[in-house]
Amino acid sequence: MDHRAESNALVKLALVVIPSPACANRNANQDSLDQIANNLVHRIDLVSTVPVFVNVQKNKNVILLVVLAHVQLAILAQSVLRNAHQIVTVRCACTNAFVRTVPRAILKPAGVNVQQAFTVLLVRKECPPGRFGRDCMELCSCMNGATCDPVNGSCACLAGWQGELCDRVCDANTFGANCAQRCNCTGDVKCDPVSGDCICPPGLQGERCDQPCPSGSYGAGCMGVCACKNEATCDAVSGRCLCASGWRGWHCDRPCPDGFYGKQCAQICDCGFGSQEGNGALSRCDHVTGECLCPSGWTGPDCRTPCPPNRWGNGCTETCQCENGGSCDPLTGLCSCPPGWIGKACDQECPAGLHGINCAQHCHCLNNATCDSRTGKCLCSPGWMGAACEFRCPFGYFGPSCNGVCQCQAGAACDHVTGECRCLPGWTGERCDKKCPDGKYGINCSEVCQCEHGASCHHITGHCLCTPGWRGRRCHRPCIKGYYGRNCAQRCNCPKQNNCDHITGQCSCPAGYTGPTCSHLCPEGKFGQDCHSRCSCSANANCDPVTGDCICKPGFSGPGCNEGCVQGKFGFDCKENCTCENGGICDSVFGKCTCPSGFIGTMCELPCPSNRHGINCIEECPCENGGTCSRTTGQCVCPPGFTGINCKLVCPETKYGAGCTEKCRCKNGGFCNPVDGTCKCTLGWTGPSCEQECPKGRYGAGCALECRCHNNAHCDRITGCCDCPDGFYGSMCEFKCPEGMYGWYCSKFCNCLNGAACDPTTGQCLCPPGFHGDKCESTCPIGSYGVNCRLKCDCGDYDCDSTTGQCICPLGFTGPRCQDVCRSGRYGFNCEQSCKCYNGARCNMFTGQCECAAGWLGATCQREDYSHNVLPSRGDVPNHVNRGYYRR
């Protein structure tokens, strides 16, 4: 058959095959089909539209058979181009069903291009199967698929058969055509009579069956997969596991139980099993070698010697890694750190805000204070004092430990941290010892004075201090008529008809007066205009400066002017009444008041300003902190809470009130207010005298804050920090210890084995099903299972899984108590494997080996045994075609 590429244009010639209805379902058709199949030369299946060429040789004995009906063909043949549009119709004839000789023109050598899916058979005419001789009249006698010669009828046996009629299987150790070849199998192993392939028994493989199953497989054809573990060997025939030393179980997946070791776990450990030896745990030995395995913290051949210092672990082989004075647990190697240190190796100082063992204590320090990581003692920032650094430095002190003494003057306070002075209004300078410069007053001397006519202002209040001759809030108004000088306190001494200058008081003098302000009478013994006339009066009398008449001098009276004025009188003939107030003394001549200490004014009617005292109020009061001074003596009267000559000092810690005479009642470190004696309690205390601890659930200053601790944690009444009970952690003790931790602040590590969790409070191991012991280190004894190994296995003579209690069945058995044999098609442990047996073969429930039914051979019973002369046939082809099918 040749295939070539098509490049010519197609010329279509339709060949339509229409089966005759009369041919349907007739048995005669089967004979025709048998005849066609027996003379099969070429069978061509064309399924695509890709052009395919078939070279057909010109031969009168060759026919083209189209088997599928209703198929349109496109045929390209150079010899029939002239008949390109010819339609050939072939109808089925029952006498020769589906067979029709193709017209000679098409049989000429030509290319056939097929464009639709159909099947083409090329056949030649020969005797039908089972016939031979002239006109195929003789019946063949050949058996077991043998063919007979169409001329003489001699049998041509298939491979594996012998005899004249091909009725005997090849003799033992022979095979093939005419049984001429000898088997090449090892020992007594038989071979297949057709192919010569050796038929290996279970456990063997190879062309000659001279090789055992490879490691990990067993059984017939070595198809079974071994389930053995831990270097166990597998029986090549049955698949049974032969455990290595130290292992047991069907799959050798379980180590020897505690106390046993060696081959089949038959040897007893010599390590003191079954008794407590002061080491807190039963000794164990290696389940393979029997060597004693000391638990953590112990060493020696019998595990009775505790670890020396700085050593820990199994056999004390590990070196402790603790620093900074930490000690090492001989069992776990975990470091127990001294106060102030944490970390696996005690190499980390406590974080800020924590101190003590495991840094579990919260510092109570406030106001940016730090605490000693070992003792928790607060190291206050500058400007603070108290156990928790909760108090500012008292008035007059500042800096670290409040040891600095403020140097501020004029009643100024200083910053409790830096000591910087905070000046009162009217003062400036680093120590507040300088008055505001001229023209400025008030806080920080920032206010501008509004005074006029050269007046200065008070550095504190801004009050204008007028120059002589001026008055008013801004010194913008002159003295009222008749007055002049400073504060306009001086009266003009000019004659009534004349005015004086409001600044100088200078007058235009009338007769009898002289001086710049006309304040002076004519000198004694003189009178008249410009005092040119001479008087003739006695010593206590003056002559009238105008007229020259003799009159008593001011301060004298009586007929001879020999009597002085009584108290309260002054002037000529002592007729004027003195106007001095507040104990002022009146001059008997002019009536001028001499004021006592503490008063000023022409009539001594004005008390000294609050910051002045003494004669003429010229002294400044030295009092600070709001203290007032006596206008007379200048002695300071301190406000409540202050004492000292200048009221500079705060009352001592135990005193308060006016003169610091009252005794404070504050307890437990409470701060006493030096003014009124009220107590400011330290953290964690309350009550009028700070005598009561905060009630449960409250903390802080005045116990005003509510604790937020969970899980019955204790709340620190000072800081509100939660002291967690064992098994909890977190700022509010809201979290249980994470898995693997327990105890106070989860600071201890669980020492449980085999995936067991531990109680977060006590650390007691909570064993998972299948394990028991203080550390869950032991599997359940044989015959028990479940939580704490309390449940008993119900498996009869078999063991059960220590976790689930499921029975561990031997090969070939299954069921809750291993009471059931494997169902058909299953074998092995728990009947988990599927049999690979065919054609009615039985499967061994232990090994999976196939026991073939009659007529079949091979590991999976898929090769036919011709010795039984049984040929199952395919129902979709004729019998003689079946025989050809089995020869392939």
Image: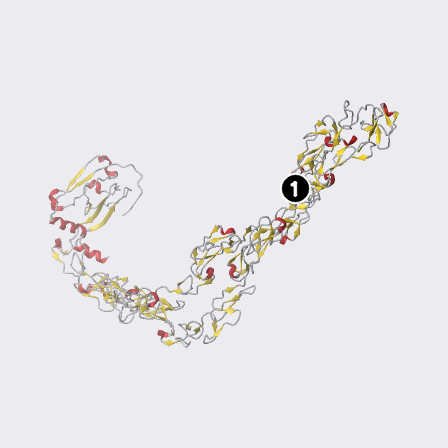
Local crowd at mark 1 within 10 Å, few (<14), some, or many (≥20)? some
Residue 260 spot, x, y in % from top left: 38, 74
Q: Could you tell me if residue 781 is visible in this image?
A: yes
Q: Quadrant of residue 831?
A: bottom left
Type of the residue with mark 1: Leu
- Residue 658 in percent (x, y) is at 62, 48
From the top left corner, tell me how far across and down residue 338 is, in percent: 54, 63
573 to the left or right of 757: right
Is residue 173 or residue 246 the one in the foreground?
A: 246
Q: Quadrant of the C terminus?
A: bottom left
Left-right relation of 557 to 213: right
Q: As drawn, which residue projects farthest toward the front?
A: 559
Q: Which residue is mark 1?
A: 424
> Relative to residue 363, is residue 503 drawn left or right?
right
Q: Is residue 591 visible?
A: no
Instruction: Tell which of 158 and 424 is nearer to you.
Output: 424
The foreground one among 652 and 539 is 539
Of 395 and 287, nearer the camera is 395
Rendered view: 762 above or below 597? below
Measured along the vertical axis of the image, is residue 864 above or below residue 648?
A: below
Q: Position of residue 382 (x, y in %)?
A: 62, 51
Q: What color scheme is it? A: secondary structure
Q: Give the quarter of the image for residue 495.
A: top right
Question: How many numbered marks does the figure carry?
Answer: 1
**Label 1 secondary element:** loop
